[in-house]
Amino acid sequence: MIFKNKKNISGLSLLEALVSTVIIGIGFVAILQMVNYSVQSMHTSGERTKANFLTNVIAEDVISSRDSSTTSHSNFTKYLMGTDESSPIFDAGACKSKDGTASTDVGKIYGTGSSDAHAMKLNKWKALLNSKSYLKCRGVNETRKFQVYKICRSGCTYTNTSIQDDEIYIGRIQINLNDGKKRKYLYFQADYKLVGVN
């Protein structure tokens, strides 16, 4: 008589296989979400870096050109003030939609048909900020504005008797990113007029 040793060979049951598949699936979903968050975070960081650079470009243009004059304006700051102090001289409407708009000045950053240095600066800013090519549009709440405020001791819209100069011009750049959730502001002294100096 031959005796056969029967060994119990235990394998994976269907239930165990399903449980392990679910555990591995949850791990993969978590990893994919983490990768997606990392990509979005890098994108947002890159847009903020570009916004910092572009606000610095505008501030440097204003400060370096503040003494330049044209036939119609004594200096660049007076030109930037415009006729209405309450409205910004520059308001880019690039993000009225998520797709944005393409600026006609992309590729020719100073525009065409203008030899006025002040107008060419505005064309440059419009080409940089009014195009989705430089800063992407992610929603209708994104804003790109530049305004100059005049603060004086008396006789103007914004008065302050404690300032040491006769007039101070403050530039304000505002860029909203990520559908308005991230905001970049830069305030800087664009120009000034000393007391008793014309």
Image: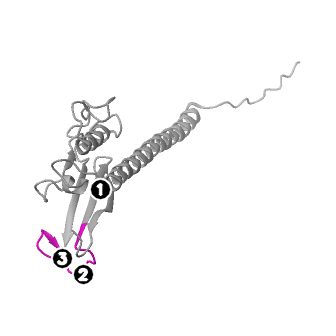
Of the pair 146 and 196, the residue shown nearer to us: 196
Numbered tag placed on residue 153 in the rendering: 3
Furthest-top residue in view?
1
Q: Which mark is residue 67?
A: 1
Query: Which is more toward the observer, 73 or 93?
Result: 73
Q: Earlier in the sequence, mark 2 or mark 1?
A: 1
Question: Which residue carries the number 2 mark?
Answer: 162
Q: Badge 2: few (under 14), some or many (20 or more) residues near its Cα, within 10 Å? A: few
Q: State the image coordinates of residue 40 (x, y, percent, origin top left).
A: 43, 42
Position of residue 158 measured from the top left corner of the image (x, y, whole percent): 16, 70
Dot 3 falls on a residue whose secondary structure is loop
Residue type pointed to by label 2: Ser
Q: Image quarter for residue 119?
A: top left
Q: Residue farthest to the right?
A: 1
Q: Which residues are magenta?
A: 153-168
Residue drawn 32% across the image and 30% down it: 108
94, above or below 88, in the image = above
Image quarter in which the N terminus is found: top right
Give me the C-alpha separation between circle 2 and circle 3.
Answer: 7 Å
Judging depth in this view, the residue of 98 and 91 nearest the camera is 91
Q: Is residue 15 above or below residue 78?
A: above
Q: Where on the picture, by quarter, is residue 165?
A: bottom left
- Image coloring type: one colour
Residue 140: percent from left, percent from top: 22, 43
Q: Amino acid at mark 3?
A: Arg
